[in-house]
Image: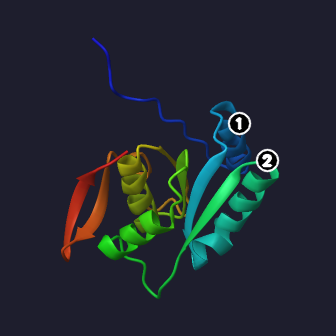
């Protein structure tokens, strides 16, 4: 009997960024989309972007804007709209909402989902679903 489950690698600590760079090299990820908002970009996203570019990875930075980022149709469409279509992975720089949207988008785009969380306050980093607000109603949707 074959399993459809994939091994999930989790790295915590100061070496997590180096592990991300190594992972991209090992899996030949040369084109990625990095999704962040202004706060998560300042907290970690900029570091991730610079390290990826220094390692020769082509980074498409997708910066979410607005006073309150909500995992709804508008923000999800915004991510798809800013994606180039040739990304091999989507990387979420953030927690909660950003992870949910990027997990969903990567699932629908059939690419890898990588998470660089900025807070340990949620349990959704290894979840199989995304908590999204669709038609003004909260739903959990199957994702990566």
How many C-alpha atoms fall within 10 Å of the one at disc 2: few (<14), some, or many (≥20)?
A: some
Q: Which residue is mark 2?
A: 55
Residue at position x 63%, y 40% from top? 29
Residue at position x 55%, y 40% from top? 10
Q: Height in image: 6 above or below 65?
A: above
Residue with the most extreme front position: 85
The alpha-carbon separation of the residues under discs 2 and 1 comes to 8 Å
Q: Which residue is mark 1?
A: 25
Rendering quarter of residue 41: bottom right
On the image, the x and y values in percent for residue 5 come to: 36, 28
How many C-alpha atoms fall within 10 Å of the one at disc 1: few (<14), some, or many (≥20)?
A: some
Residue with the most extreme right position: 54
Can residue 129 be seen in this snapshot?
Answer: yes
Residue at position x 69%, y 53% from top? 58
Of the numbered discs 2 and 1, the one sitting upstream in the chain is 1
The answer to whether residue 52 is left or right of residue 142 is right
- Report helix, strand or loop for mark 1: helix
On the image, the x and y values in percent for residue 144 come to: 37, 45
Q: Height in image: 18 above or below 132?
A: above
């Amino acid at each position: 009997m074959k399993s459809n489950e994939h091994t999930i690698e989790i790295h915590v600590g100061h070496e997590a960024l180096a592990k991300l760079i190594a992972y991209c090299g090992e899996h030949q990820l040369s084109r990625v989309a990095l999704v962040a908002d202004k706060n998560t970009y300042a907290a970690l996203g900029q570091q991730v972007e610079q390290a990826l570019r220094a390692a020769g990875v082509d980074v498409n930075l997708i910066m979410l804007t607005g006073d309150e980022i909500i995992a709804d149709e508008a923000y999800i469409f915004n991510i798809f709209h800013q994606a180039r279509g040739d990304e091999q992975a989507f990387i979420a720089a953030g927690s909660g909402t950003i992870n949910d949207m990027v997990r969903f988008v990567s699932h629908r785009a059939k690419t890898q989902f990588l998470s660089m969380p900025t807070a340990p306050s949620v349990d959704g980093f290894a979840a199989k679903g995304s908590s999204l607000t669709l038609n003004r109603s909260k739903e959990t949707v199957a994702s990566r």
